[in-house]
Amino acid sequence: YRRLRWGGASNVIMSAPTQPSVDPEQFRRRQRELHQLSARVESLKEYLVSLDKRKQSNRMVRTELRKRGGDKGKPAGKIWLATGEVFLKMSQEEAAGIMGEDDIQIENEIQTAREELKTATLEMEQVAGRDTASSAAFSTLKSMSSKEVDGMLGAAPRG
């Protein structure tokens, strides 16, 4: 608002806004788009959490398989492996192979979901009218797989 003064300091009149107001239809459209994008971001975050849980579960199974296969003089037995709602009986080697393939698939899904999350976040900021220059810089960063991180940590002294 613009203040108009006349006479003395005690006489102040507020005039109409100097800038045109936002078109209500445009505002509703932008709010709807922001809501859809925020729902997409939330969904992707939940998906990433579920993938992380699945990855952790696989890690626990691989650890248990290593413990069972630790006795070299003993032949590897068969185990029951749950895949979704189905239980399968297979050798420990087959189970380890399936777990390895699943780990690769999980890593690929995590990478894809992270890229989609970056894109959706940038779109949200653009729709909201925020400066996306700083966010765009983060979108060019390459995420690292857990194997790359483990490789780096393996070379670093732990303490």
Image (cartoon, helix red, strand yellow):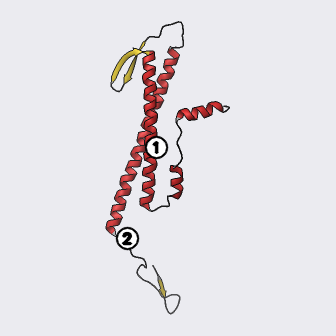
Q: Is residue 148 above or below residue 63?
A: below
Alpha carbon of mark 1 to alpha carbon of mark 2: how far? 34 Å
Residue, x 33% and y 63% (percent of image)?
28
Residue, x 52% and y 17% (percent of image)?
67
Q: In the visual, does 44 lie left or right of 145?
A: left
Pick whichever, 113 or 1, lies toward us.
113
Q: Is there CB contact under 8 Å for labels 1 and 2?
A: no
Pick whichever, 139 or 52, lies toward us.
139
Residue 22: mark:
2
Residue 78: mark:
none
Q: In the visual, does 24 lie left or right of 151?
A: left
SS class, disc 1 = helix
Residue 154 sits in which quadrant?
Answer: top right
Q: Amino acid at mark 1?
A: Arg
The residue to which callout 1 is attached is 114
Residue 33 spot, x, y in % from top left:
36, 57
Q: In the visual, does 22 lie left or right of 55?
A: left
Residue 34 spot, x, y in % from top left:
38, 57
Residue 50 sits in which quadrant?
Answer: top left
